[in-house]
Amino acid sequence: MDLGTLIGLIGGFAAIVTSALASGSSVDAFIDLPSVVMTIGGSYAALMTNFSLREGLGIWKIIGLAFKVRDFGGRALVEKLFELADRARREGILSLEEYINELDDRFLQQGLKLVVDGTDAEIIRTIMETELNQMNERHGRWIKMLDAWSKLAPGFGMLGTVMGLIGMMRNLEDKSRIGPNMAVALITTFYGAIMANYAFTPLMGKMAGQDHDETLIKEMCIEGVLSIQAGDNPRILLVKLASYLPPADKAAVIDKFGKD
């Protein structure tokens, strides 16, 4: 569980409730079913129209990723690539073949298989970078969906506001309906702003951060594979890949493998 996401959502909800109570209102005053239907239901329906059915249904699974801690294992990857480079330098490239299937990373597996097969370095780079670009395209599509939803929700909130005002103006003679119609008019705008600023924009930032971290790992794999293919000194590979890591992990890896 990603505590940052959880704390952020709980803290934001607490701030909203506290502000409502401090203003002399009650939580019940902010609960309105027609407004929920308009903002959440309406904006989600529009999202389904804008994207494919598969993507519209899959967005919930993607949102769920924001609640998971995704450790892509940068330090462990550097250590593994150093060990593979050292083995390849001592025993030859073909000696890696028996270890490839033991790797958990399919992307790294594919790259090393190309190396063992004697594929040209430029072709290896092209293949791996193409796969990386396709991954970024998929991630970008999901981020684009969250961005679209963050814009659609306030729009439907404004539609609800207009509907509430129309209902109020059409029934000015019935004073008992002025309050409910005004409530719908204001609460739908409130819900739309909440969805955009409390939920979807922060979740979009979380997804972008995860995409950045995974992209970094893939770039490390590409550099490591090409370094092994070129027969670089394992210590050169170590220093090159350690530069991708946070300072603490970089120092730990260099201390562990960078000294005789």
Image (tube, helix red, strand yellow):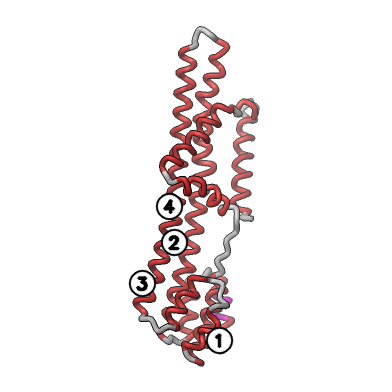
The mark nearer the N terminus, 3 or 2, is 3
The mark nearer the N terminus, 1 or 3, is 3
Query: Contact, CB < 8 Å: mark 4 with mark 1?
Result: no
Residue in front for this viewpoint, 176 or 56: 56
**Given this view, does label 1 or label 3 mark the residue nearer the observer?**
3
Rendering quarter of residue 37 = top right
The mark nearer the N terminus, 4 or 1, is 4
Residue under label 4, please give it: 141
**Given this view, does label 2 or label 1 mark the residue nearer the observer?**
2
Residue under label 1, please give it: 259
Q: What label sits on residue 135 in the rendered view?
A: 2
In the image, residue 254 lies in the stretch drawn in magenta:
yes
Q: Position of residue 92 (x, y in %)?
A: 48, 91
The mark nearer the N terminus, 2 or 4, is 2
Q: Residues within 10 Å of mark 2 (few under 14, many from 20)?
A: some
Residue under label 3, please give it: 126
* Residue extent of the magenta highlight: 251-255
Circle 1: residue type = Lys
Tag 2, which secondary structure? Answer: helix
Check the image and report above or below for 65 versus 174.
Answer: below
